[in-house]
Image (tube, coloured by chain):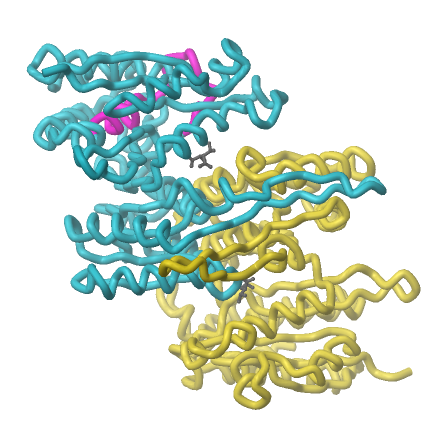
Chain colours: A cyan, B yellow
């Protein structure tokens, strides 16, 4: 049988550095009974520099064909002035949209060894383990019209459109309910139904999906602004949060920052299972950005990207035991006191470079 | 000369209770050389119960005519099933829109005596003093189309529209720059220009307004999701934040929660100055909601509403000295250790009821 395929898109900024460490991990699995056919391509600013597009059609074809895509990060001030449709983010957005990766899973987990890095008091974040399920292919990110028109008189009008259809809300809430069953069995849905019609439909479809297929899961609702407040006040009250694309962007970033471990957080973006093979298209990426200010200095933390590969093992390659093993290796190097530059501070530990951290994880495997 | 007029809309939940304490304060100023003609009316769920509308046309006329409107809070589970256009929030939204109150000022200030209530570590919030300037009459709150259509086949489609014109962004950023000049002279503008065309226009108009009229103010830009993160990580980096209606809703709630003093935070919503008289329409309200769970129990903290009246003194009645005096009275009762139920916890203090707190503030005046 052919090896499963992995398309690696390191991207910009610290993307290539952290991805180099993931390569070491992938290679380790290759030497130990889990070989992958690995391909690499460009996305983001580097793709624009090479092809004038944030992702080339050829790279998109490879992404469509791959069993999983692993992405580093995109963007940086260098590309601030490129045309809107070619900006680095457009590559990421095209991947999400064209692969129909509607379900974005963003775990916000606080690592015990790092709880003191949180700006929140330790007792509020210790043991924190939230999963944010964000809708990723709809809403204001992709709705039309999306345009700026010149009204004359020096006035312009900008329009973005938030659109949601029943089936989009149904499938993302089903994902949230299914994942909740594997956790603490609680889902909190967030929208602004007091102001937005899409919030009203969101609320009603989540309710209906719950009643029809997931009545065993505890469901609550919160307005998204109150949700942001509650995340800051008492984050441990949540298990799974399900929300739309834009609220998910905001709320998952706030939740990620609460953990104090931004450099540690992975994410998965999944499509619907293929009716024949059961396979889902999937893209895995760290929650952090391209951090151009520290790029190329060996300061970046590769763990978020390594853990994104662990999510790939779990969700795309049915290799839960290997994912556990990789996660345990990460826990071990942290427990051993190894820290990249972003993690130096409360608690001490030995400062290591990006590649020393990667080597240590491989050694721990 | 006729007295200035004040329209009081206590609203729902704890609104009437906290407003009763503000009345005591208003009356004190009346006895001491600052008389107001005070009128009262309904808004929110109670207006729906009385008139079938979240605010009656008669109340809107009074609001149009008043020198300032003071609002308590609206909403509660009792009105969860009323028709969308008559929901309690519709009354508040109509006030904002029809009075053209485009500039919403939300100070997020941490009171020293209460810094331990924050979920953040004390050193991160002690002395915190941010002003969020939120655009309040545009964006996705009011843009058309805003509708749910039946597509047949059991599918519905919900649409909300984010619209911004140049002049709307110009005037709100001018307010932010003007207010920054009275503070630390720094403005951070937040949008999602990497995803939204309205974010792109927002960014460019803020830049142009800055260059043309406010080049002396320091201006930075942040993506709104990163802004949410930074608010949680290191809130003291900000002075004035200017942002759109929906991001402002989310970010100001997060910022408010950081202070640990949600029951203490006032807000002001201002219109444009009248070209002839210089007067601006204005509405003042606490940041907290109607808290139906504690309504009628004497547990609510009236300070946010009292400080909203202090903002009215300052911004609508050119009575800065009186505003200072009222704010000092609030500081004094806190320093004396008086605490409503929401403030009991770290630091101790004597628990007082809503009305005892009001009486103490009047006594301190
Ligand atoms: C880079 C950007 C387009 C993206 C988004 O807004 O979705 C990012 O913020 C994220 O959350 O993955
Ligand atoms: C009550 C609601 C309509 C309102 C809003 O969303 O603007 C509230 O959350 C606020 O921030 O004042």
At a point 75% along the width and 62% down the height, the residue shown is B271
Residue B12: percent from the left, percent from the top? 51, 80
Number of numbered markers:
0
**Nearer to the camera, B207 or A81:** A81
Residue A321: percent from the left, percent from the top? 8, 30
Does residue B14 sit above or below B196 in this rendering? below
Q: Locate the N terminus of chain B and report the quarter of the image it occupies.
A: bottom right
**Nearer to the camera, B316 or A134:** A134
A309 drawn magenta: yes
Figure quadrant of residue A228:
bottom left
B349 drawn magenta: no
**Nearer to the camera, A273 or A298:** A273
Displayed-image quarter of ligand 2: bottom right
**Residue B105 appears left or right of A37:** right
**Residue A218 appears left or right of B351:** left
Residue range (magenta): A289-310
Does residue A69 sit above or below B75 in this rendering? above
At a point 17% along the width and 19% down the height, the residue shown is A4
Q: Locate the C terminus of chain B and report the quarter of the image it occupies.
A: bottom right
At a point 56% along the width and 73% down the height, the residue shown is B85
Residue B322: percent from the left, percent from the top? 73, 71
Report whether residue B114 is seen. no
**Nearer to the camera, A271 or A258:** A271
**Residue A277 appears left or right of A128:** left
Residue projecting furthest to the bottom: B50
């Amino acid at each position: 049988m052919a090896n499963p395929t992995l398309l690696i898109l390191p991207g910009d900024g610290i993307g290539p550095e952290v991805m180099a460490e993931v390569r070491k991990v992938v290679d380790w699995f290759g030497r130990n009974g889990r070989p992958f056919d690995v391909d690499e391509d460009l996305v983001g600013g580097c793709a624009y520099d090479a092809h004038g597009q944030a992702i080339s059609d050829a790279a998109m074809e490879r992404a469509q064909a791959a069993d999983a895509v692993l992405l580093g990060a995109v963007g940086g001030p260098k590309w601030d002035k490129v045309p809107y449709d070619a900006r680095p983010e457009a590559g990421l957005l095209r991947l999400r949209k064209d692969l129909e990766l509607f379900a974005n899973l963003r775990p916000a987990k606080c690592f015990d060894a790092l709880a003191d890095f949180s700006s929140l008091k330790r007792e509020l974040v210790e043991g924190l383990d939230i999963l944010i399920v964000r809708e990723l292919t709809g809403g204001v990110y992709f709705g039309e019209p999306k345009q700026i028109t010149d009204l004359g008189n020096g006035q312009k009008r900008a329009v973005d459109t938030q659109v949601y259809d029943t089936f989009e809300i149904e499938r993302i809430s089903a994902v949230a309910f299914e994942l909740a069953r594997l956790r603490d069995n609680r889902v909190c849905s967030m929208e602004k139904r007091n102001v937005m019609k899409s919030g009203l439909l969101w609320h009603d479809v989540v309710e209906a999906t719950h009643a029809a297929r997931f009545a065993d899961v505890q469901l609550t609702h919160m307005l998204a602004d109150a949700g942001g407040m509650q995340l800051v006040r008492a984050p441990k009250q949540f298990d799974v949060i399900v929300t739309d694309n834009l609220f998910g962007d905001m709320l998952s970033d706030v939740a990620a920052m609460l953990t104090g471990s931004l450099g540690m957080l992975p994410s998965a973006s999944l499509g619907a299972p293929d009716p024949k093979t059961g396979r889902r298209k999937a893209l895995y990426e760290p929650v952090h950005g391209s951090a151009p200010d520290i790029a190329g200095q060996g300061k970046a933390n590769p763990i978020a990207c390594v853990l994104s590969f662990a999510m790939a093992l779990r969700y795309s390659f049915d290799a839960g035991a290997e994912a556990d093993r990789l996660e345990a290796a990460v826990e071990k190097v942290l427990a051993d006191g190894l820290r990249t530059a972003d993690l130096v501070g409360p608690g001490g530990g030995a400062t290591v470079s990006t590649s020393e951290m990667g080597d240590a994880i491989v050694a721990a495997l």
